[in-house]
Image (cartoon, helix red, strand yellow):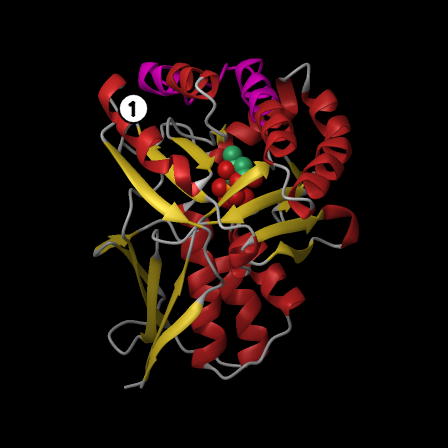
Amino acid sequence: MKETVAIAHPNFALVKYWGKKDSNQNRPAMSSISVTVDSMISKTKIFKNIQSNHHQLFINGKEESDLSKILPPLEYLSEFSGTDEYLVIESQNNFPTSSGLASSASGIASFVTAYEAHYNLCLDINHKVEASMLGSGSAPRSLIGGFVFMDHKDNYRCSQILKEPEWPLDVLICIASKEPKKISSREGMRASKKTSPIYQDWLDINHKHIDLALNAIKTKNMAALENVAEENCKLMHEVMKTSIPSISYMTDVTYSCLSEIENLRSLGHKLLYTIDAGPQVKIICDPTSSEIIKNRIIETTDVIDIIHAGIGGPPEIINES
Ligand code: DP6
């Protein structure tokens, strides 16, 4: 029986998406910029389900009853394949799932890539963006390697700002907890849009942050990227905090990483941090500083683990039979 396997990498946003324009189509209310990371991988295998007459999704070997993220992309793609066959979708992550490490982005991007190859579809990037976005607003960015811009003013067009080898930075993912998050991004975004008094300011500043980050990345200016990415990250967490109910994904371990980052900065290391909907701290730094940063964070904080990654590429098909 034909099986198709694809891999994709997570991406971390430097200018973030937090809030939807349209919940039905899952459209972000703002543009975003991300970096795709290597080392962390979602691997998804698909094949025809001959055992039952519904789609089945397994994540890390466990069958999921909630298909709400996978069915919209699947239904969109089945318009192109013209098939109504049911699928088994088996997805594995080599990193903690649902804990602010973008597993849904890489999971969905790997699924869309596998589906396209399985049915020989040759879709253009805009259709793959549309399919992925129906699953998760950050997933289209994982269809592209390097630094990626998703432009909400141009129908969510995703484009590459720099290819992965063009600015070879390291990414250190400091794992503060492996527990799944208690409030999903989806739920949190809904609350923020409805209740945060600074949600409109958050929308208004997006354009400025995008311009600053685009410029910083194109000119490979670490200090400028640090300023805009950290300001954007702090503001997103302030939007979360001022929502009702107040949302906080950070823990004491997150805060201790942040304080060590300030110490490292005062010693002259070039680094920036970002934090998403989870307690993990992602550090982007010059490779010459990685080992020192890693050792200092391990020595001075209670992080469980640090994943040492580089800038990643686009999804790949790894096996077709
Ligand atoms: C904080 O893409 O996970 O990581 O569209 O509801 O699936 P859904 O949300 P998701 O949200 C990502 C939020 C973020 C910021 C970002 O990656 O831009």
The answer to whether 162 is drawn above or below residue 265 in the figure is below
Graded by Cα atoms within 10 Å as few (under 14), some (14 to 19) or many (20 or more), the crowding at tag 1 reads: some
Query: Looking at numbered disc 1 in the image, what kind of residue is underneath it?
Result: Arg
Q: Quadrant of the N terminus?
A: bottom left
Examine the image and state in which quarter residue 133 appears: bottom right
Residue at image point 51% right, 28% down: 188
| 201 relative position to 306: left or right | right
Above or below 201: residue 61: below
Q: Residue at x 62, y 23 (%)?
A: 231
* Mark 1 sits near ligand 1, with its Cβ under 8 Å away: no
Horizontal and vertical percent for residue 164? 52, 57
Image position of 206 with respect to 54: above or below? above
Residue 62 shown in magenta: no
Pick the front one: 25 or 285: 285
Q: Nearer the viewer, residue 239 or 25?
A: 239
Spot occupied by residue 64 in the image (x, y as percentages of width and height): 30, 52
Tell whether 253 sits left or right of 206: left
Measured as percent of width and height from the top left, residue 72 is found at: 52, 58
Give the structural element (helix, strand or loop) at label 1.
helix
Asked whether the viewer can see residue 69, the reply is no
Main secondary structure along the magenta-highlighted residues = helix
Which residue corresponds to the image point at 35% horizontal and 56% vertical from the top-left?
41
Residue at image mark 1 = 296
Q: Is residue 312 visible?
A: yes
Write down the quadrant of residue 172 in the picture. top left
Q: Quadrant of the C terminus?
A: bottom left
Residue bounds of the magenta highlight = 233-257
**Would residue 298 appear left or right of 121 to someone viewing this image?**
left
| Residue lying at 26% horizontally and 17% vertically, measured from the top left | 300
